[in-house]
Amino acid sequence: EEHPEALASRGRLGGMLSEQGEHQEALELFHGLLPVQERVFGKDHPRTLSSMSQMVGLLLHAGSAPQAVEMQRELLHRQQQVLGEQHAHTVVSKSKLSTMLSDQGKHQEALPLFQACFEGRKKELGERHKGTLDSMYGVAKSLSRLARHAEALRVFTECLPLMEETNHPWLSSLRALLSDCQKALDSSQPSPSPSFSSAAASSSASPEVCGRSILSIFPPCGCFPFPAFSS
């Protein structure tokens, strides 16, 4: 059972079951396989890390998102220690974790991961690469969900032409989020108060305000919405 080739065969079987849609059976297989791999190969061995990655996807499919997140955290930590921050597998794991956290509404935690992925991918792959734009989109979306609309709008605006040039599959989603972000910014701005002279002119011309104090034309203090950005 602990022979390396036997363990490799079990790993391949688990992958095949997953591809065939037998997710629960595959998950049970990897649940049994992972601790044996850790004991035989070590926690940082590529085969062990591969099984962890498989299990994360299967846990998500089974609706066990919190468990999936914790396993993805551990996988990322091991890859950072063994492969380094800039290794392609580490960056992919970091991107997956940021997306998982975002899907659970943990935008504050997801944001720095998206930012790190964006910076790394931009340097290694270029700003027009799909992976780079995926991470840039994640940064902007997280900022928007954290009500940091001005920052989000700047990133959305930078990302839009790049997605248009490359026909990115998330282009329509980005446009919708950009529009929502602009509306949120517009609604958070104070409404301009009418000038004293225009109010006075209105007072003399309109019978509805005759006999009222000029101050009654203005809304009471506190009626104007002010921006409420969180840091």
Image (tube, helix red, strand yellow):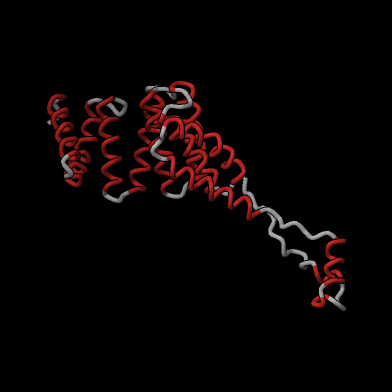
In percent of width and height, residue 184 lies at 59, 52
Q: Considering depth in this image, is 109 or 209 the residue closer to the camera?
A: 209
In percent of width and height, residue 116 lies at 49, 31
Q: Considering depth in this image, is 215 or 58 the residue closer to the camera?
A: 215
**Picture layout, residue 100 above or below residue 12:** below
Residue visible at 37% across and 32% down in the picture: 93
50 left or right of 132? Answer: left
Residue visible at 21% across and 43% down in the picture: 27
The extreme front residue here reads 205
In percent of width and height, residue 38 lies at 26, 30
In percent of width and height, residue 190 lies at 71, 56
Residue visible at 69% across and 56% down in the picture: 226
11 left or right of 186? Answer: left
Q: Considering depth in this image, is 23 or 76 the residue closer to the camera?
A: 23
Picture quarter containing residue 125?
top left
Q: Is residue 73 visible?
A: no
Image quadrant in which the C terminus is located: top right
Picture quarter containing residue 34?
top left
Residue visible at 50% across and 43% down in the picture: 141
Q: Considering depth in this image, is 54 or 30 the residue closer to the camera?
A: 54
Image quadrant in which the N terminus is located: top left
Q: Is residue 147 visible?
A: yes
